[in-house]
Image (spheres, coloured by chain):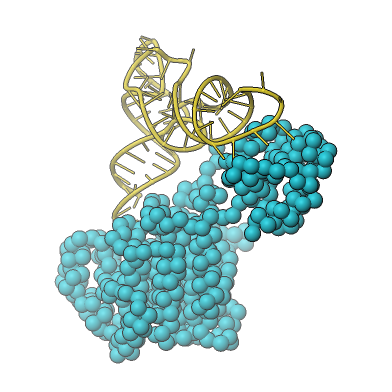
RNA sequence: GUGGGCGUGGCCUAGGGGUUUAAGGCGCCAGGUUGUGGCCCUGGAGAUCGAGGGUUCAAAUCCCUCCGCUCACCCCA
């Protein structure tokens, strides 16, 4: 028997209410904030991700779904959303639009990882990107949007962690200090961190290994070594967030796993969340577009994992609004009844009212039983006699009473009921 | 990639060598008289007990291998 590939899942009708709800809240909010939807291809040339996410990151080194197409071009299933949006920004000359350009996406993401709670090989992310403006208020806007988004879903007890990981300038000064400090403790570092020391020293700070964490405690923090510009930027972002009344924690160890981030970075987690608790994160990537196209374009963005959001909604007992089901069920008896039922169901549907016809060849009792378990509020019954008479029986399932009415009145009556 | 737990009808579970022709609950279908739901009662369909191999007179039950699911590490959304 065929099954969903490892780490993927079917989103069954029973779960769709969550997805509709989240999708709706996201697009309503984006509209309100002036972010426009963009959809990019599910796969891109592999190079885009190598150059943006960075060799040496887990994503690029071991998590990408890469294949050659028939022409021999290396393609990769999108492992994150920012780089494709930047590619689109460049490709379509969006620097000619009023800056910043505000975009959002809701798209599947692919990473070859061992699946576990809240982690999938195909998962969905809702993300926003604001490209073409370096103003700190834009950082705050993106964080605010992220925060309001989660709040609009009814999520509570969220923690926002913020850090600033500096620009090239700060790092030029800071990284040597960091490396120097860590070189003194290199024997005590985990094997991973031995490698990080050379390849991505910043990420030494957020190693989860206990002994590494101890070392990190006394390590110089980049937050204390920001250049005047970054320092001021960070202060302003914090200031704006205070005006917006968004509580935050400064986490000097927060470093994101993608190389393109600079300056502001942030993550949102549920309070006391365990493994895979991060439901959203983002930050500035002021150098990414320049690296991809040569034109300096500051930008800031955010992305949230939908599956993790749903997981947390369920943990918090949040129920999404249900997806409306047809309220009218048309039961019938006999061939004549079936004909009339088909006609009536069609009339109802064309009038914009949800209706379903009973399956064939069942007793009236069975039909009513099904109507009940489908949650129909009104059942139309067309027996042979009613069919002859040109009438129908309209049964209110909640009250349990019914009346016979002329067929012509059915749509009108049921429409009233629908309102 | 590493480690733990688990694999019995669509779902949840019982059974841990012979009394099992694999049991129960949910769900599905049908009946409980003539054309009427929700409760109740009765019946039915539906399982090569994850796969392959081995031990044994006898395996869902014991052993091995593989596969899958799941949780955790790593990393991330």
Give the side of residue A182 with respect to residue A50, left or right.
left
Picture coordinates of residue A89, whole percent (x, y) = 55, 78
Give the side of residue A188 with respect to residue A320, left or right.
left
Picture coordinates of residue A184, whole percent (x, y) = 16, 71
The image quadrant that residue A179 belongs to is bottom left
Picture coordinates of residue A112, whole percent (x, y) = 44, 55
The image quadrant that residue A246 belongs to is bottom left
The residue positioned 52% from the left and 74% from the top of the image is: A30
The residue positioned 58% from the left and 66% from the top of the image is: A41
Q: Nearer the viewer, residue B62 or A349?
A: A349
Q: Nearer the viewer, residue A175 or A396?
A: A396
Residue A56 appears anywhere in the view: no
Residue A40 appears anywhere in the view: yes
Picture coordinates of residue A360, whole percent (x, y) = 72, 35
The residue positioned 58% from the left and 45% from the top of the image is: A398
Chain rendered cyan: A
Query: For the C terminus of chain A, which image quadrant?
Result: bottom right
Q: Nearer the viewer, residue A297 or B72?
A: B72
Considering every residue shown, the one lying at the far bottom of the view is A228
Query: For the N terminus of chain A, which image quadrant?
Result: top right
The residue positioned 23% from the left and 77% from the top of the image is: A221
Compared with residue A369, is residue A123 higher up or lower down, i.e. above or below? below
What's the colour of chain B in the image?
A: yellow
**Number of numbered markers:** 0
């Amino acid at each position: 028997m065929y099954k969903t590939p490892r780490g993927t899942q079917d989103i069954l009708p029973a779960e769709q209410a969550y997805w509709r709800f989240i999708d709706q809240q996201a697009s309503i909010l984006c509209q309100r904030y002036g972010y426009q939807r963009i959809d990019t291809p599910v796969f891109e040339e592999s190079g885009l991700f190598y150059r943006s996410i960075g060799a040496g990151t887990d994503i690029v080194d071991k998590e990408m779904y890469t294949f050659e197409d028939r022409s021999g071009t290396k393609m990769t299933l999108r492992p994150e959303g920012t780089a494709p949006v930047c590619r689109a920004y460049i490709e379509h000359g969006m620097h000619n639009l009023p800056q910043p350009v505000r975009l959002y996406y809701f798209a599947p993401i692919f990473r070859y990882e061992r699946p576990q709670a809240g982690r999938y090989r195909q998962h969905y992310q809702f993300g926003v990107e604001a490209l073409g403006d370096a103003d700190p208020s834009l950082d705050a806007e993106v964080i605010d949007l992220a925060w309001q988004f989660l709040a609009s879903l009814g999520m509570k007890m969220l923690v926002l962690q913020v850090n600033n990981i500096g620009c090239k300038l700060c790092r030029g000064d800071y990284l040597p200090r960091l490396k120097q400090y860590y070189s003194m403790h290199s024997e005590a570092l985990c094997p991973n961190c031995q490698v990080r020391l050379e390849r991505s020293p910043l990420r030494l700070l957020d190693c989860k290994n206990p002994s590494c964490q101890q070392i990190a405690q006394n390590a110089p923090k980049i937050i204390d070594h920001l250049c005047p510009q970054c320092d001021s930027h960070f202060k302003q972002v914090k200031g704006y967030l205070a005006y917006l009344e968004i509580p935050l924690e400064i986490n000097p160890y927060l470093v994101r796993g993608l190389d393109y981030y600079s300056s502001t970075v942030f993550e949102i987690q549920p309070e006391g969340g365990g493994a895979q608790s991060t439901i959203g994160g983002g930050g500035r990537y002021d150098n990414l577009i320049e690296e991809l196209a040569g034109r300096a374009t500051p930008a800031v963005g955010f992305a949230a994992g939908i599956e993790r959001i749903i997981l947390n909604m369920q943990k918090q007992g949040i129920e999404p609004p249900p997806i409306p089901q047809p309220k009218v069920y048309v039961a019938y008896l006999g061939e004549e009844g079936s004909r009339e039922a088909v006609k009536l169901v069609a009339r109802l549907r064309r009038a914009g009212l949800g209706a379903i016809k009973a399956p064939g060849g069942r007793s009236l009792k069975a039909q009513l039983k099904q109507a009940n378990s489908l949650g129909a509020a009104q059942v139309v019954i067309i027996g042979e006699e009613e069919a002859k008479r040109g009438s129908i029986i309209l049964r209110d399932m909640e009250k349990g009473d019914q009346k016979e009415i002329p067929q012509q009145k059915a749509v009108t009556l049921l429409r009233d009921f629908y309102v």
